[in-house]
Amino acid sequence: TRIEARGTARLGDDTVEVLDVTSAGERRRYYIDPTTHRLAGMDQNEESGRGSRLTARRVYRDYRALNSLQVPFEEERLLEGQRVMQLFVSTFSTNAGVDDNQFQRPTSAPENRK
């Protein structure tokens, strides 16, 4: 994986820090809020279904603290700069109905090596 800082850019009305991450030949561009260090958005290339590639962008807004997590309650999705979807989260829960014992390390698992 290769990570490159690309300086700053505008994402809507905000100035954000830009990181390019290339892994297994695929590049994604991440936009980071310089004040909160939260993910403000990301770009990735997707297949168009007609053999060409399109730039798909996701923009994250309205972060709220829930169970010590910062969760975006709004997501906007764009293809080639055109909005195709906007999501508004009304409720969010984590591990709903999952027993905490599911996350216990098995006794047969090897020790962590540092």
Image (cartoon, rainbow, N blue to C red):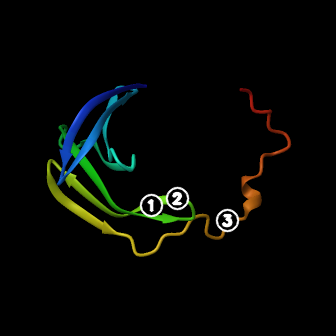
For disc 1, the marked residue is 71
Residue at image position (17%, 37%) is 52
Circle 3 or circle 2, nearest the eye: 2
Secondary element type, mark 1? strand
- The disc, 3 or 1, on the residue closer to the chain's N-terminal end is 1
Three-letter code, disc 1: Val
Kind of residue indicated by mark 2: Leu
> Eyeballing the image, is 26 above or below 105?
above
Q: CA distance from mark 3 to mark 2?
A: 17 Å
Instruction: Determine the residue positioned at 80% across, 38% down.
Output: 109
Above or below residue 91? Residue 55 is above
Pointer 2 residue: 69
Quarter of the figure that contains the C terminus: top right
In the image, 100 versus 6, the foreground residue is 6
Query: On the picture, is 33 further left or further right than 10?
Result: right
Q: Residue furthest right?
A: 107
Label 3: element kind? loop
The answer to which quarter of the image holds residue 96 is bottom right
Image coords of residue 92 (percent x, y): 48, 70
Q: CA distance from mark 2 to mark 1?
A: 6 Å
Mark 3 sits on what residue?
Answer: 98
Taking the spot 25% from the left edge, 32% from the top edge, the residue there is 7
Badges 3 and 1: C-beta atoms under 8 Å apart?
A: no
Of labels 3 and 2, earlier in sequence is 2
- At label 3, counting other C-alpha atoms closer than 10 Å, the crowd grade (few under 14, some 14-19, many 20 or more) is few
Per the model, the C-alpha gap separating discs 3 and 1 is: 19 Å
